[in-house]
Image (cartoon, rainbow, N blue to C red):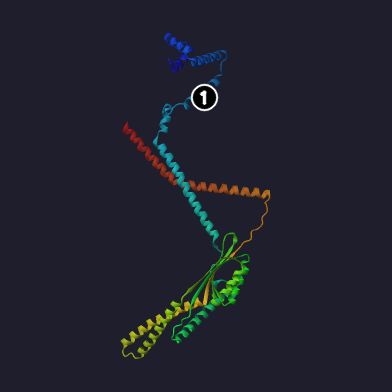
Amino acid sequence: MNCTQWHALLDAHLAGSLTPAQQKDFEAHLNACDDCQHLYTVRLDCRMLDDAAEVPALFASSWRQQVKREEENMQEPDQLPVRRRKFLNRPWLRVASIAAALLVVVGGSLTLGRQLGMQQRATDASYDYAAGYSMPYQERAGTPGLNSKQAMAPAEMEMAADHSAPQSVAREEADATPHAATRIIRTASLTLSTRSFDTDLAALETKLLALGGYVENIDLSTQTRARRNADMRLRVPVNALDAFLEQLKGMGQLLSYNESAQDVSEQYADLETRLQTQQSKMQRLQALLEKAGSVKDLLEIENEVANTQYELDSLTGALRGYDSKINYATLWLTLQEETVPEAQGQPALGARIRAALEDAWAATKAFCEDAAVLVVVLLPFAAVLALVVFIIRIFIKKHRRKNK
C-alpha cells in the first residue's frame, strides 16, 4: 500500500468502516511511514477537538466552501467543469478577441491620425495666416509710411522706363554698328530683423523712392506670437544699388544676404542684330509695296509686312525687358519683426490653482470628445465584426452537427 491509497482509507478508518484485510494493510503502512503517522496524529487531535467542542455551522460551511474553491483553482485544465471547458475552447471566442484587439488598434490609430492632422492644419493656419495686407503694392492704402503720391510712384516709374526703352532702341537703330558694351543684370536678396517694424518699413520705402526706385510687390503677413513679416520685391536703379544696400544693412540685424550678377551681353547683342535685320526687311517690303502691280502681289506683300511687324514688336519688347532688368536691379527684401520677450514674474498661488483647474477641465473635455469620436469610429467596425462572428458561429454549429 502506498501513501495515496492510505490517504483514501483514512476517513473510513476513522469512521470504523474498514474490512479486516484493509485494516491490516492500513496499520502496516502506518507503522512503516513517518509522514502518514504524523498526519494520523494530527487527524486524531483534530477529532478530539471536534468531540470536545462543536464548530458553529456557519463557520464550518464557509470553511468547506473555501476549501472547495481552492481545490477547483488547483485542478488541471482537464479537470475543469465541462461547461467551462466548452466555453473556453470555443473557436469564436478567440476570433472575437483578436478582432476586438484589431478593432481598437485600427480605430484608435484612425482617430489619432485624424487628430494629429487637424492639429497640424491648425498650426499651419496660425503660423502663416494673412493679416489682410497681402496685395500688390499699387493696391495698398492706409499702410503706415505710404501716401497717395508714393502709391502712384511705381506706375509712373514703369511708364518712364517704357518711354526710355524706345529711346534707347531708337538710338541703337540710328547707329548701324552693334554696341559692344557689357550688360549685367544684378539681383540681390536680403533678410533683416528689426524691433521697430513700422518705422523701419516706412524709412525703407522713403529711401527707395529718394533713389529713384519703386516697390514692385509687397506681402505683409502675421506669424506666430504676433510677429509681422514683410516680403518685398524692390526695383532699384543699378547705379544706386550698393548705396541702398549699405543703408539697409545698418537699419536692423542682418540675417542673410545674397547677390548675383548675370551677363546678358550676348543675348542683348543677338536681339539687336535680329531687330536690325527685321528693320531692313521692313524697308524693302515698303519699297516693294509701292511697286506692287497686281492685287495678288499686294496681298502677299501686306501679309509679309504684318509678319515682319510682329517680329519687330516682339524683339522691341524683349529689348525693353532687358533694359528694365539692366537699368533697375531686383532686390528681394524680407523684413521680420523681432518681438521683445516680456518679463513675467511668478504667478500667485490662486492664479496657479485656477490655471491648473482650467487645464484639467480642458483635458477632461478633450478626452470625452475623443472618446465619443472613437466610439463613433468603432461602430461600423463593430457591426461588421458582429456579423462576421455570427456567420462563423453558424458555420461551426453546422459543422458539429455533420460530425455528430
Q: Residue at x 47, y 85 (%)?
A: 171
Quarter of the image where one finds residue 318 = bottom left
| Residue 61 in picture, x, y percent from top left | 53, 21
> Element type at marker 1?
helix
Specify few, some or many for label 1: CA neighbours under 10 Å numbering under 14, 14-19, or 20 or more. Answer: few
Is residue 393 in view from this perspective?
yes
Question: Which amino acid, mark 1?
Answer: Gln
Between residue 308 and residue 350, name the one nearer to us. 308
Quarter of the image where one finds residue 394 = top left
Residue 103 vertical placement versus 5 (above, below)? below
| Residue 234 in picture, x, y percent from top left | 54, 72
Quadrant where the N terminus is found in the figure: top left
Q: Is residue 140 left or right of residue 102?
A: right
Read off the residue under disc 1: 66
Is residue 143 in view from this perspective?
no
Q: How many marks?
A: 1
| Residue 10 in picture, x, y percent from top left | 47, 14
Between residue 286 and residue 105, name the one nearer to us. 286
